[in-house]
Image (cartoon, rainbow, N blue to C red):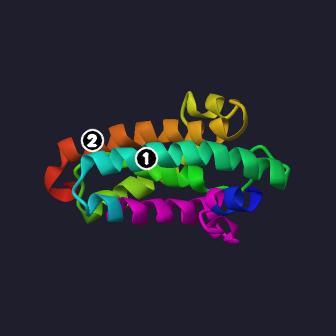
Amino acid sequence: MNRLALVLATCGYVGYMPIAPGTAGSVVGLALFAAVRGTGSAVAEVALVGVLAVIGVWSASAAGRQLGSLDPAPVVIDEVVGMLLTLLLVPVNVAGACLGFLVFRVLDVVKPWPARRLEALPGGLGVVADDGMAAVYGNLVMRGAIALAPGWFA
């Protein structure tokens, strides 16, 4: 079970990229977004975010115990969830998806209030919740960008 948690938390060991593992995890999230958006099902999109958030909390907790850290760098499932949540139900084209990627990465690094405070939640909940909060802001930014420039991003 420990190995499964580590594989899931690191997204198939993508989190072990030597440079920018969080960005690599966000790329995985972007690829999953493209796959689920291709189904045309809003239910599938929402379900994927929910299922991965639950798996993320569990696997990040278990991986953190194995790796001896509350939020180890190789754990990137939180970035996957955050990327998916940033674009959740937002009608974007390829340029909009790329903008969403950049917006999420910036917000994930900056961690606007209360994202940084959510890191203090116990175990994997804190790992996933802070990125989730950054992603909620990202989703709102994307909706604003589309409202301002619909031809560019939607």
Quadrant in which the C terminus is drawn? bottom left
- Within-10-Å neighbours for mark 2: few <14, some 14–19, many 20+: many
Q: Is residue 26 visible?
A: yes
Q: Specify the label residue 49 is tagged with.
A: 1
Q: Specify the label residue 143 is tagged with.
A: 2
Between 86 and 46, the one nearer to me in the picture:
46
Circle 1: element type: helix
Confirm whether the magenta stretch covers residue 20.
yes
Left or right: 83 as drawn, with respect to 121: left
**Residue 125 pos. (x, y %):** 64, 36
Between 131 and 152, the one nearer to me in the picture:
131
Between 111 and 62, the one nearer to me in the picture:
62
Residue type of the residue flagged with mark 2: Arg
Circle 2: element type: helix
Q: What range of the chain is rendered magenta?
A: 8-34
**Residue 78 pos. (x, y %):** 57, 49
- The image quarter containing residue 43 is top left
Left or right: 23 as drawn, with respect to 126: left
**Residue 66 pos. (x, y %):** 82, 53
Number of on-image labels:
2
Kindly give the residue lying farthest to the front in the view shown: 1
Quadrant in which the N terminus is drawn? bottom right
Front of the two marks 2 and 1: 1
Could you tell me which residue is drawn at 21 percent across and 57 percent down?
A: 40
Q: Is the magenta stretch mostly helix, strand or loop?
A: helix
Residue type of the residue flagged with mark 1: Val
**Dots 2, 1 in contact, CB < 8 A:** no
